[in-house]
Amino acid sequence: MKSKIVNPVGEGLVPSRKSTRLKDFNYAQANAVFFITLCSLNKKQVFVKDDFNTEVMKCIKNERKQIGHAIYVFCLMPDHLHLLLSPLETGIPVPQFMGGLSSLITRLSWRYSFTGRLLQRSFYDHVIRKDEDLRGIAEYILNNPVRRGLVEEWHDYLYCGFIDPLPM
């Protein structure tokens, strides 16, 4: 049975949001690797202008440096962003990092004539297990623009690549 919370406006009950995070998992665990997908609101193609995409990529790299997370692989697609990342020793959990990054990207978008929310409220995450092929996951992320038909080889796509070396 879903729990209910009272609508602050007082107009009946609304279902509470189901958490997309693993219960009792330490999302700040040093060197845990996460495959993150952050989608645009309603899958709208918002990452299609070179100047905006370049600023988004700078934003991702600056936030990585400021917070101290490792970002191994990134891919900015027209309607979503993939990251393969680790919190390292920062103690800052992935949801906090992603919340800050989402806010920065949204505020940046307002300078490019976007209005309102740009991104979905939450992101998808997959905790990489020790037995999973990290290189294969990285290749899957990098080949996203190839599968979508945007380029023939991922090297030709301006908005994907490696930042930090993969932990092997």
Image (spheres, grey):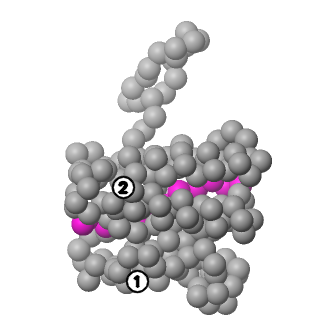
Of circles 1 and 2, the one toward us is 2
26 left or right, relative to 58: left
Q: Residue at x 52, y 23 (%)?
A: 14
Asked if 51 appears above or below 3 in the picture, the reply is: below
Give the numbered dot on residue 114: none
77 left or right, relative to 124: right
Chain part drawn in magenta: 31-44
Q: Any magenta on residue 32?
A: yes
Does residue 158 appear in the picture of this structure? yes
Does residue 34 appear in the picture of this structure? no
- Of the numbered discs 1 and 2, the one sitting upstream in the chain is 2
Report which residue position mark 2 lands on: 67
Looking at the picture, how far across and down is residue 112, in whole percent?
Answer: 74, 52
The secondary structure type at the circle numbered 2 is helix
Q: Residue at x 62, y 62 (%)?
A: 55
Q: Residue at x 77, y 47 (%)?
A: 113
Q: Residue at x 24, y 52 (%)?
A: 91
Report which residue position mark 1 lands on: 136
The secondary structure type at the circle numbered 1 is helix
**How far separated are the C-alphas under marks 1 and 2?**
26 Å
Mark 2, Cα crowd under 10 Å, few <14 / some 14-19 / many 20+, is some
For residue 2, which quarter of the picture?
Answer: top left
Label 1 amino acid? Gly
Please name whichever residue, 108 or 72, is drawn nearer the observer in this view of the structure.
108
Asked if 17 appears above or below 150 in the picture, the reply is: above
128 left or right, relative to 153: left
Label 2 amino acid? Ile
Looking at the picture, how far across and down is residue 44, in whole percent?
Answer: 71, 55
Quadrant of the snapshot with the N terminus: top left
Q: Any magenta on residue 9?
A: no
Quadrant of the snapshot with the C terminus: bottom left
